[in-house]
Every structure is written in C-alpha cells, then in structure tokens.
Amino acid sequence: QLQAFGGGLVQAGGSLGLSCAASGRTTYHLGWFRQAPGKEREFVTAITWNDGSAYYADSVKGRFTISRENAKNTIYLQMNSLKPEDTAIYYCAATVGSSSLTMEDSYYYWGQGTEVTVSS
C-alpha cells in the first residue's frame, strides 16, 4: 500500500514537497508519475531501494529532487522553481522488478494520487 502526502496550490517559481510512504516490504523501487488534465500519465522521477540511484524526466531535471528514507520506507519529492506546466495529479508507485523505472508498466503498485496546482 502506498500513501502520498503533500501537494496543494503554489505560485509559479515556488516550492512544494511531496512524500509517499510504502507499507510492506522495504525493497521497493519507488517512483513518481504525474497526469495533467487531458494528458496521459508521465514519468517524473524514481529512486532505487538498494543504492539510491535516481532518475529524472528531462522536464524536471535540476528542479525536482527525489530522496528516500529506507528506515521509514518513505520517499520524498522536493519540487522547486515550479511552473504552471507542473500542474497535475502526482502518483507514487512501487515495483520490485528490474525493468526500466521510467516506464509506467514496470510498476505493480500505485498510490491514490495527490494534486499539485501551480498558478501563473
């Protein structure tokens, strides 16, 4: 089970933090995806459980930072320099597989989503 926290309304250029807590096993690779209104869900970032390797979509590189706290089985997403195009429902997801972490189909479990709105 995955529970996402955070989200809300922020002005462009501002910052926001999300977190996602996973229950059960502690060896999930965890990631964030987002879905903007009228668009398909897309990869944002992911982090491995074993060595903390992080992956980012080009659109968020340098602005978003993913981190994890294995003791709490929780990941965090720090979003800086937010843009209106970052507005979306953000979903955390978990997988135990070794497939590409940037691919939606690689993930087995999904959280309920949390809304982020960036006003211009």
Image: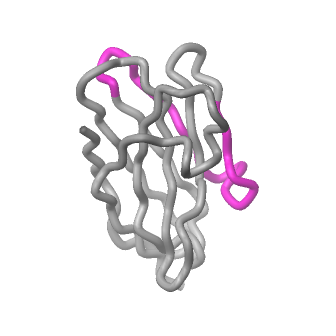
Q: Is residue 20 above or below residue 41?
A: above
Q: Residue at x 41, y 34 (%)?
A: 75
Q: Residue at x 36, y 73 (%)?
A: 9
Magenta-drawn segment: 54-73
Q: In the rendered image, which quarter is residue 54 located in?
A: top right
Q: Nearer the viewer, residue 13 or 84?
A: 84
Q: Residue at x 67, y 46 (%)?
A: 56
Q: Nearer the viewer, residue 47 or 17?
A: 47
Q: Is residue 61 above or below residue 71?
A: below
Percent position of residue 68, x then y: 45, 28
Residue 95 on the magenta span: no
Percent position of residue 72, x then y: 29, 22
Q: Is residue 38 above or below residue 51?
A: below
Image quarter where the C terminus lies is bottom right
Percent position of residue 70, x then y: 39, 18
Q: In the rendered image, which quarter is residue 93 located in?
A: top left
Q: How many marks?
A: 0
Residue 61 on the magenta span: yes
Classify residue 45 as left or right of residue 92.
Answer: right
Q: Residue at x 29, y 35 (%)?
A: 21
Classify residue 60 as left or right of residue 106.
Answer: right
Work out which residue is located at the far right of the displayed protein and give it.
58
Q: Is residue 21 above or below residue 103?
A: above
